Image (cartoon, grey):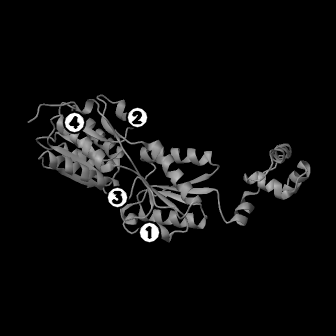
């Protein structure tokens, strides 16, 4: 096995100089850096990362705990986080909490045991309501889910605004009996519910909303029940892509025509939403920006632990499509 002393001998420098070059430290001349890199390449030297971590007490590993990896929103977030981590020479532990507080606690404990440099987390409501980031031995950035009382860096969508605009669009198109299905296990669904309620109230309309487990199969069950009503709702609105998928499955099974018999809208610009006929009106979330910003905030927190807490709020884009074509106002 090639050792650091072998690299130093071939490069004609000290082992300390080799360590500085390999770690990217400053204070090394261009010539020394060139000779060390040439020796590393020639000898096929690979640093002992485990020994380096033991000496420094730090790792080059970050944790990412997502609520539900089956949700394409979190898949896209994970990809964006990994992209920036790779650019910074860091590894990512990806964990799926599956909206389960026990799994969430297990993975947070694992992150502590692994001595990660920091964690990006989309917390359940049960964790969020009592979350104290200072109780953890690593910096933390919340993504997608956040409450004002939590003193943690966060990157979130303006959920109230997005739901208000989405509901307002349906109202201006002439829809009145608008039913909103929203996720019950995170902070995101209730925040979007508040935007829906505000839009309905501003229009003098009676709201009807139902909190559900944000799973496509559960959304389909609820939508099946709603579609048996007479008269039908004018529109069904989903607070997430998985809920929207369940609604779409129920409508297809019922053989109903969209938007002739009812309108459909929701959150997340998933590929299928623009492939069905008619295509579905959605709020597009800036998933790439959310993930990349979260990791950059985490790296800043690692470098500057005492800096002020930052919250980045991003705006969703309303994509109006065929599923919400207007009807005459009643």
Q: Is residue 317 above or below residue 74?
A: above
Q: CA distance from mark 1 to mark 3?
A: 19 Å
State the separation of the CA atoms marked 3 and 2. Answer: 25 Å
Q: Earlier in the sequence, mark 1 or mark 4?
A: 1
Q: Are marks 1 and 3 in contact (CB under 8 Å)?
A: no
Mark 1 surroundings within 10 Å by alpha-carbon count, few (fewer than 14), some (14 through 19), many (20 or more): few
Look at 31% across and 57% down and name the residue there. Answer: 184
Sequence-wise, which precedes: disc 3 or disc 2?
3
In the image, taking residue 249 as reference, residue 173 lies left or right, namely left
| Residue 28 locus on image (x, y percent) | 79, 51
Task: Say the numbered circle drawn on residue 316.
Answer: none
Q: Which residue lies under the disc numbered 1?
A: 132
Please name the residue that numbered disc 2 is placed on: 271
Q: Which circle's residue, 3 or 4, is located before the other in the chain?
A: 3
Determine the CA span between mark 1 and mark 4.
42 Å
Circle nearer the N terminus (2, 4): 4
Q: Earlier in the sequence, mark 2 or mark 1?
A: 1
**Residue under pointer 4:** 263
Q: Is disc 4 placed on a helix, strand or loop?
A: strand
Q: Which residue is mark 3?
A: 185
Q: Nearer the viewer, residue 147 or 267?
A: 147
């Amino acid at each position: 096995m090639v050792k650091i002393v072998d690299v130093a001998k071939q490069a004609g420098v000290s082992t300390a100089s080799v360590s500085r070059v390999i770690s990217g430290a400053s204070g090394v001349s261009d010539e020394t850096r060139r000779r060390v890199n040439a020796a590393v390449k020639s000898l096929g030297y690979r640093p002992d990362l485990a020994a380096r971590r033991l000496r420094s007490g730090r790792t080059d590993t970050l944790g990412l705990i997502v609520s539900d990896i089956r949700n394409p929103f979190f898949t896209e977030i994970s990809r964006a986080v990994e992209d920036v981590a790779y650019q910074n020479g860091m590894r990512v532990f990806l964990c799926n909490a599956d909206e389960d507080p026990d799994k969430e606690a297990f993975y947070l404990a694992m992150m502590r045991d692994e001595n990660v440099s920091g964690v990006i987390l989309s917390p359940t409501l049960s964790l969020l309501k009592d979350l104290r980031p200072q109780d953890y031995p690593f910096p933390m950035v919340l993504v997608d889910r956040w409450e004002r009382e939590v003193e943690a860096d966060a990157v979130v969508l303006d959920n109230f605004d997005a739901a208000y605009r989405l509901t307002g669009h349906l109202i201006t198109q002439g829809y009145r009996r608008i039913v909103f299905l929203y996720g019950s296990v995170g902070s995101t669904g209730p925040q979007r519910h508040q935007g829906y309620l505000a839009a309905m109230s501003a229009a003098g309309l009676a709201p009807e909303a139902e909190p559900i487990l944000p799973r496509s199969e559960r959304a389909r069950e609820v939508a099946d029940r709603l579609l048996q009503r007479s008269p039908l709702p004018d529109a069904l609105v989903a607070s997430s892509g998985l809920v929207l998928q369940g609604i779409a499955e129920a409508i297809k099974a019922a053989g109903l025509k969209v938007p002739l018999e009812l309108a459909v809208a929701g959150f997340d610009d998933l590929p299928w939403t623009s492939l069905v006929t008619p295509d579905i009106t959605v709020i597009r979330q800036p998933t790439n920006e959310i993930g990349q910003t979260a990791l950059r905030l985490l790296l800043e927190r690692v470098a500057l632990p005492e800096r002020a807490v930052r919250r980045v709020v991003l705006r969703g884009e309303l994509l109006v499509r065929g599923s919400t074509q207007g009807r005459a106002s009643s």
